[in-house]
Image: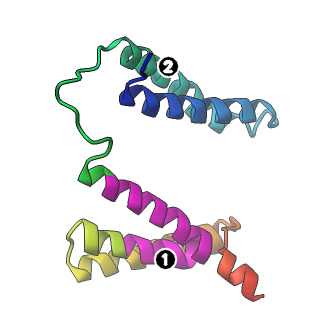
Amino acid sequence: MRIPEQSITSGVLLLVFLFFFTQALFFGPSARTMPLLVSVPGLVFCLVQFIIDLKRQPDGAGRKPMFSGSEVKAIAWIVGFILGISVLGFVYGSPLLVAAYLYFHAGERLRAALVAAIACVAFTYGFMDRLMEVPLFEGLLFQYLR
């Protein structure tokens, strides 16, 4: 039996939500609330979508590529954000990545991208780090340079 491509996507997401659900069960009572609020509806919706995708009959005549051009771009930006935040941290990486996304992908003017980057710095550094005193990930590059 050949599994349709749509089922692969919903199956992977089902496994991701199942992982977060099981991890949340090991947290303390107050810490498990948010992961359960996200993972339980995600599990339900992904399970329903997985069943729907499995029941669909694949159309063999019109074979399409697995990913379209816009999907490849979206995946590249997601991977770029993850790598950028991992290397540069939230305070330095997020403004840079937000500005790059708005300017290169969304087609915004440079001025709008810079305003968004400044707002991102104000939020991550000013509000989250200084005002709320939330310890943000500082990035692997800066941890390595210490």
Quarter of the image that includes the N terminus: top left
Residue assigned mark 2: 47
- As shown in the figure, which amino acid type bears the numbered disc 1? Val
Stretch of the chain drawn in magenta: 72-99
Callout 1: 10 Å neighbours few (<14), some, many (20+)? many
Q: Position of residue 89 (x, y in %)?
A: 60, 73
Tell which tag, 2 or 1, sits nearer the viewer: 2
Q: Secondary structure at mark 2?
A: helix
Residue 141 figure quarter: bottom right
For residue 74, which numbered disc appears in the image? none
Task: Tell me what residue is drawn at x 74 percent, y 80 percent.
Answer: 143
Q: Seen in the image, is 82 located left or right of residue 75?
A: right
The kind of residue on which mark 2 rests is: Leu
Q: Is residue 4 left or right of residue 89?
A: left
Label 2, residues with CA under 10 Å away: few <14, some 14-19, many ≥20: some
Main secondary structure type of the part rendered in magenta: helix
What secondary structure is marked by label 1? Answer: helix
Q: Position of residue 92 (x, y in %)?
A: 54, 79
At 27% from the left and 73% from the top, the residue drawn is 104
Q: Percent x, y for residue 111?
A: 24, 82
The residue pinned by badge 1 equals: 121
- Contact between marks 2 and 1 (CB within 8 A): the answer is no
Q: Residue at x 26, y 53 (%)?
A: 70
Q: Quadrant of residue 63?
A: top left
Q: Which sits in the foreground, 5 or 34?
A: 5
